[in-house]
């Protein structure tokens, strides 16, 4: 099912975004670790009960901010709405950097917007792509999508940076 209006999915190419960063920004973010939490993003988007009492269901995960694709060797930046802060950084400075990286990574030249039609199949590599849905109208209209995920080779902190 596809909504009457809206509901598109946007995909940001995090490899192309990283490659566009100036050398001094790449040097600054290399080696940094970011804490990701679905509870964080749910709170930020207004969920009244973001399951904070079930940390085992929605665990906090540490991810490399800059990761190297295990097959291509290309580097990418890994930010998303789940990124709550940079580990071992003061909160204001870390949030400022995360906002800057997100702004840079979501410039129009790095984003593809897919307008869904019934029967569409879209595949992407979640390790190097940030994605989000746009609002749809009416908001109570069904938007039925199915997703299948493939597990990565290892957590990012165990992979070559």
Image (cartoon, rainbow, N blue to C red):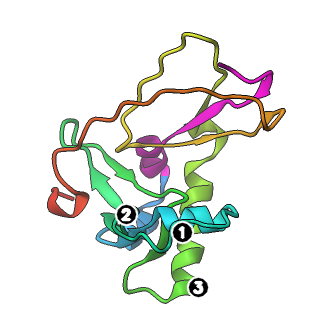
First to last magenta residue range: 1-20
Q: Earlier in the sequence, mark 1 or mark 2?
A: 1
* Foreground label between 1 and 2: 1
Asked if residue 126 lies in the magenta stretch, the reply is: no
* Image vertical order of residue 41 relative to residue 3, above or below: below
Q: Residue furthest bottom?
A: 90
Crowdedness of circle 2 by 10 Å Cα count: few (<14), some, many (20+)? Answer: many
Q: Which residue lies at the image location 36% right of the left edge and 30% below the top edge? A: 148
Q: Earlier in the sequence, mark 3 or mark 2?
A: 2
Which residue is identified by label 3?
Answer: 92
* Image vertical order of residue 140 relative to residue 158, above or below: above
Q: Residue furthest right?
A: 138
Quarter of the figure that contains the C terminus: bottom left
Can residue 100 be seen at all in this image of the molecule? no
Crowdedness of circle 3 by 10 Å Cα count: few (<14), some, many (20+)? Answer: few
Q: How far, Cα to Cα, is label 1 from label 2?
A: 17 Å
Q: Which residue lies at the image location 67% right of the left edge and 22% below the top edge? A: 115
- In the image, taking residue 108 as reference, residue 83 lies left or right, namely left
Q: Earlier in the sequence, mark 1 or mark 3?
A: 1
* Relative depth, front residue between 105 and 152: 152
* Foreground label between 1 and 3: 1
Q: Are marks 1 and 3 in contact (CB under 8 Å)?
A: no
* Relative depth, front residue between 8 and 30: 8
Q: How far, Cα to Cα, is label 1 from label 3?
A: 16 Å
Which residue is identified by label 2?
Answer: 65
Q: Residue 74, how many percent across, how many down?
A: 28, 43
Q: Are marks 3 and 2 in contact (CB under 8 Å)?
A: no
Which residue is identified by label 1?
Answer: 40
| Quarter residue 92 falls in | bottom right
- In the image, taking residue 86 as reference, residue 10 lies left or right, namely right
Q: Residue 96, how many percent across, how many down?
A: 59, 75
């Amino acid at each position: 099912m596809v909504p009457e209006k809206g509901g598109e999915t946007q995909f940001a190419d995090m490899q192309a975004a990283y490659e566009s960063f100036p050398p001094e920004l790449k040097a600054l973010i290399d080696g940094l670790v970011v804490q990701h939490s679905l509870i964080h993003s749910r709170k930020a988007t207004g969920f009244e009960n973001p399951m904070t009492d079930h940390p085992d269901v929605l665990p906090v995960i540490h991810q490399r901010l800059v990761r190297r694709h295990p097959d291509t060797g290309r580097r990418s930046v890994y930010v998303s709405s789940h990124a709550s802060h940079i580990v071992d950084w003061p909160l204001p400075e870390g949030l400022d950097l995360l906002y800057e990286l997100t702004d840079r990574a979501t410039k129009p030249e790095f984003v593809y917007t897919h307008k869904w039609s019934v029967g569409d199949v879209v595949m992407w590599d979640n390790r190097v792509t940030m994605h989000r849905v746009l609002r749809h109208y009416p908001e109570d209209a069904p938007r039925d999508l199915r997703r299948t995920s493939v597990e990565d080779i290892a957590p990012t902190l165990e992979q070559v940076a």
